[in-house]
Image: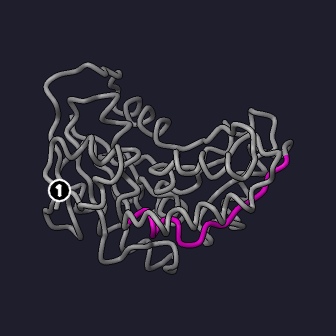
């Protein structure tokens, strides 16, 4: 069994770690676009073209499924990716966890990139899944880039700025960018410092990992042996796990299989 994941950078680590925990025996392919990161500021046409290149590199490894582990790419490029690759290769997108967060009854805050915040896509999800609760959209400029480079000081500044905009009565926070799931403990700490009571953080990695196993008809097997391998593609070429990945638990989990540089 082989599962591929794609993103502009290391935001795919959260979903890759979730897949690894559900199926340690799965071979993983991580396909990134370090030369084009970040994708958020790009035009939809440019982003889609780059996403297709990254997806084609992953598909050449003959995986059983492909996870688009990026909210922005899922918004703009998912139709094109599915048109080209399905039905031969199942393509699973990433959707912000707005629906489960609304189950708390609100209020809900959605942390996302500036490009996603206020977008028609995100507003549509809010109308569909959280129309009956109070929702505040929080732009997080610089946070994804800080996480990508494991810049702790920049992460703390961006997280503190987003926490300052989060309503004090919020009961749930949606992590609307896959990079944010790598710094959940820093986000929790910033929200506590802001004076909020314990807040549920809702990411997408766990749900995406479970969905990919359903799509390929495989049951979770957390104790499965032997451990699967890891292939890293950087701009379509074989590479090593970026050293910044080892700053995060998910990266260290994968780094036990593949060397980092």
Where 183 sits versus 20, above or below?
A: below
Instruction: Name the residue located 40 percent from the left edge and 46 percent from the top edge.
Output: 14
The answer to which quarter of the image holds residue 210 is top left
The answer to which quarter of the image holds residue 170 is top right
Instruction: Name the residue located 38 percent from the left edge and 37 percent from the top edge.
Output: 18
45 left or right of 109? left
x, y percent for residue 135: 80, 52
Look at the image and name its color scheme.
Answer: one colour
User: Badge 1: few (under 14), some or many (20 or more) residues near its Cα, within 10 Å?
Assistant: some
Q: Nearer the viewer, residue 75 or 105?
A: 105
Magenta residue check for 144: yes
Instruction: Name the residue located 40 percent from the left edge and 44 percent from the top edge.
Output: 15
207 left or right of 102? left
165 left or right of 244? right
x, y percent for residue 123: 74, 59
Where 64 sits versus 182, above or below?
A: above
Magenta residue check for 64: no
Magenta span: 134-148
Q: Nearer the viewer, residue 62 or 198?
A: 198
In the rendered image, the quadrant that contains the N terminus is top left
x, y percent for residue 158: 58, 66
Instruction: Name the residue located 75 percent from the left edge and 62 percent from the top edge.
Output: 165
Q: Which residue is mark 1?
A: 260
x, y percent for residue 261: 16, 62
Where 177 sits versus 227, above or below?
A: below
Assign a secondary structure to mark 1.
loop
């Amino acid at each position: 069994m082989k599962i591929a994941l794609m993103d502009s950078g290391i935001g795919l680590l959260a979903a890759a770690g979730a897949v690894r925990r559900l199926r340690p025996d799965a071979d993983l392919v991580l396909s990134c676009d370090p030369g084009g990161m970040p994708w958020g500021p790009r035009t939809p046409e440019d982003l889609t073209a780059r996403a297709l290149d990254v997806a084609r590199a992953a598909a050449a490894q003959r995986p059983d499924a492909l996870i688009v582990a990026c909210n922005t790419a899922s918004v703009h490029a998912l139709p094109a990716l599915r048109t080209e690759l399905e039905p031969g290769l199942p393509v699973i997108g990433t959707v912000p966890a707005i629906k489960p967060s609304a189950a708390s009854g609100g209020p809900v805050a959605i942390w996302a990139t500036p490009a996603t915040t206020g977008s028609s896509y995100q507003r549509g999800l809010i109308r569909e899944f959280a129309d009956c609760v109070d929702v505040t959209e929080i732009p997080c400029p610089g946070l994804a880039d800080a996480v990508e480079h494991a810049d702790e000081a920049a992460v703390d500044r961006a997280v503190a700025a987003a926490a300052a905009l989060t309503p004090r009565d919020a009961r749930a926070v949606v992590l609307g960018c896959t990079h944010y799931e790598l710094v959940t403990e820093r986000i929790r700490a910033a929200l506590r410092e802001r004076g909020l009571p314990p807040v549920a953080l809702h990411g997408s990695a766990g749900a995406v990992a479970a969905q990919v196993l359903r799509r390929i008809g495989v049951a979770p097997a957390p104790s499965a042996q032997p451990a699967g391998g890891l292939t890293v593609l950087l701009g379509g070429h074989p590479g090593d796990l970026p050293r910044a990945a080892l700053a995060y638990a998910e990266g260290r989990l994968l780094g036990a299989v593949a060397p980092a540089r």
